[in-house]
Amino acid sequence: MKLSREQTAFQKRLGHEFDRVELLQNALTHSSVSSATREDNQRLEFLGDRVLGLVMAEALLRADRGASEGQLAPRFNALVRKETCADVAREIDLGAVLRLGRSEMMTGGRRKQALLGDAMEAVIAAVYIDGGFDAAQRVILSLWGSRIDTVEADARDAKTALQEWAQARGMQPPRYVETARTGPDHSPVFTIAARLATGEEASASAGSKRQAEQAAAEALLKALGPKG
């Protein structure tokens, strides 16, 4: 089994040359193109999530030896969440080498955040199985780079930050209302409005309700400006 020219180039961007190239090919195979003889990357994704978590937990402890668990937890969540994994995947152009079914290719699967995040975790698992923990740790720390040192001391997600902003002012928690849904059933786009009881609101659109809610909360926090 040989890697394609594109997959070989991806190895260089990743920073790991595989001895067992089938592991990389497996990690790049989405369920939309799997078959009885071609396994998809979902099992590797499960493992990669845990490997990433261990590497990040250890890195954060080293980076700030005086931080409490309460400070470390939100930083950890910010570094391992799907959005961050997808950002890293884009930086190494992982989408270009994904093996996708026709339906996913037709709907922009190579750019989908959830799909890229899952594939990034699968690739991490493939590196771990192929080269061991040290190899996986080296790849992760290289790809995540300055994110570890610059992650905000209070890296709450936007929804949590907005809720705490409202609670600190004796207000009811913000509401999230779906105001529109467009696109085909297999690839919908949701528009969500984040609303405060005092009337302020902001909207955002994304391919999942969760992502749209987070984006709307972030937009509202920015709109609140110095009041936040």
Image (cartoon, grey):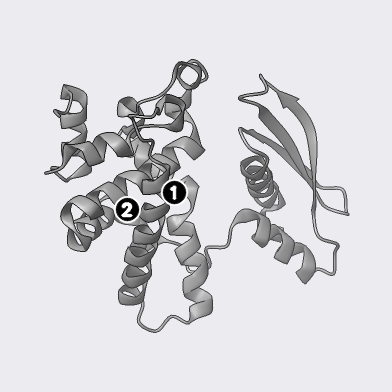
Q: Is residue 26 left or right of residue 86?
A: left
The x and y percentages for residue 98 are: 34, 29
Q: Is residue 105 above or below residue 11?
A: above
**Who is closer to the viewer here, 218 or 181?**
181
The x and y percentages for residue 131 are: 16, 54
Work out whether residue 92 can be spotted.
Answer: no
Q: Hey, what amino acid is under mark 1?
A: Thr
Q: Is residue 21 left or right of residue 61?
A: left
Label 2: which residue?
Answer: 144
Q: Residue at x 62, y 54 (%)?
A: 158
Q: Residue at x 47, y 82 (%)?
A: 68
User: Dot 2, crowdedness within 10 Å: few (<14), some or many (≥20)?
Assistant: some
Label 1: which residue?
Answer: 84
Mark closest to the chain's N terminus, 2 or 1: 1
Q: Is residue 141 left or right of residue 17?
A: right
Q: Are marks 2 and 1 in contact (CB under 8 Å)?
A: yes
Q: Hey, what amino acid is under mark 2?
A: Trp
**Who is closer to the viewer here, 29 or 217?**
29
For residue 147, the mark is none
What kind of element bears circle 1? helix
Q: Is residue 57 above or below residue 97?
A: below
User: Dot 1, crowdedness within 10 Å: few (<14), some or many (≥20)?
Assistant: some
**Who is closer to the viewer here, 179 or 27?**
27
Q: Residue at x 24, y 38 (%)?
A: 24
The x and y percentages for residue 117 are: 44, 43
Q: Give me the C-alpha separation between circle 2 and circle 1.
A: 9 Å
Count numbered badges in the picture: 2
Q: Is residue 60 above or below residue 206?
A: below
What kind of element bears circle 2? helix
Q: Residue furthest front?
A: 36
For the C terminus, give its image quadrant: bottom right
The x and y percentages for residue 148 are: 35, 61
